[in-house]
Structure formats: C-alpha cells, structure tokens
Amino acid sequence: MSNPPVSRFPIPDLADLPEDIREQIEAVQEKTGFIPNVFLALAHRPDEWRGFFAMHDAVMLRKGNLTRAEKEMIVVTVSGGNQCQYCVVAHGAILRIVAKNPLIADQVAINYRKADITDKQKAMLDFAMTVGFSSDEIGDDDYETLRSHGFDDEDIWDIGAIAAFFCLSNRLANMLSMRPNDEFYGMGR
C-alpha cells in the first residue's frame, strides 16, 4: 500500500524551488533527518511559504517569558480545538521533546483543563482558546486573569499571536488535507 499524498495540491520538486526556500528546507532536513510535510505542502506557493514561515518564526522564536514548552502547549491546544491532525501530531512531538514529558501533548490536545499542567498554564490556554474561537468576547477580565497569574502584557500578546497564527495554520493544513510525517508519531515517547 502506498502512502497517502502529503497534500491535495502538487508538491514541487526541491530542485525546482527558489534557492532561498530550498536552502531552508534542506537545513531543516539536515537538522531533523526528514522534511516535515508542511515545508513541502506550502512550497506550492513560494511567496506564501515565505510569509508563513516568517510569521511562524516571529511568534515562535521571539525571546520572551513563555517557555518553548508553553508555546508548544498553545499550538497543540488550539490545534486540537480545530481538529488539525497535522499540527497536533507534529507539534505534539515537539512538545513531548521540549517538555521531556511523553504524556503532555495528548493531554492538552484532548482536554487541557484535565492535563497535568499548572493553573498558570491553564489560564494561558484558556486565553489562547478564547483568541482562537471567540476573540470578540475578549475583555478586561481576561487580561486581569492572566496578570493575576504573573503574565505581563508582552506575554499576553505572545499567547494571542501564537494562538491566532496557529488557527491560520490549522485552517490551511485542514484545507490541504496535509498529512503528518510518520516520524512525528514516535518522537518523544
């Protein structure tokens, strides 16, 4: 049986991609040992690929108070809410690795309120879900709740930006029927 396609749309050959994109994809492949399918699927439209990964890096690599594990918790939680198989599987693997916890990704993807995380992290994920699914309802109380847990305004922006960006990512991945790489399933277990 052959593997299902990576995406509903054609995947360009690496050799045919613009040099900047090809070099970034090859760097990821060298670091991880494989090419995550998101890099290939989005390469169908090079200008959008550049914009997507520039925003990804801006929100995920920004220096701030959120830990890498907390950022990945946000990704996995909103992705679970959007039923995005690709992002739950791929970022779940990253979360398991950076948190050094083989259970955490499954817990937050299914129901973060019952996960083995801190009350502060639950407040963070409550806000991320509000941003992702009912942003019109955000009010002063939401900010006060986060501040009472020690988050400052820059942290709140980070939580919201990550949630919003990954809701976009989830919708693209679902539209494309993007398939998670098999490699992700066993990582960090």
Image (spheres, rainbow, N blue to C red):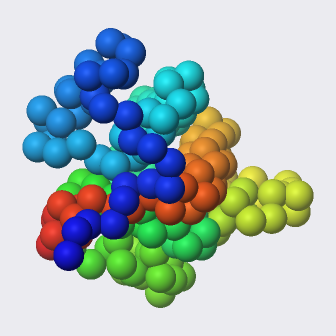
Q: Nearer the viewer, residue 58 or 87?
A: 87
In this picture, residue 55 sits left or right of residue 36: right
Which residue is at a point 56% across and 62% down the rendered structure image? 174
Q: Position of residue 140 (x, y in %)?
A: 85, 55
Q: Quick check: 33 left or right of 104?
A: left
- At x 44%, y 33%, the residue is 43
- Residue 69, above or below 31: below
- Residue 49 at least partly seen: yes
Q: Position of residue 38 (x, y in %)?
A: 40, 46
Q: Residue at x 56, y 22 (%)?
A: 47
Q: Is residue 163 visible?
A: no
Q: Quadrant of residue 5?
A: bottom left
* Residue 16 in which image quadrant: top left
Residue that lies at the very extreme toward the bottom in this rendered image: 114
Relative placement, left or right, of 41 versus 81 is: left
Q: Residue at x 37, y 55 (%)?
A: 6
The location of residue 7, given as percent across then percent down, is 45, 54
Figure quadrant of the C terminus = bottom left
Where's residue 135, x and y in %?
A: 81, 57
> Which residue lies most toward the front here?
1
Compared with 182, 65 (above or below) is above
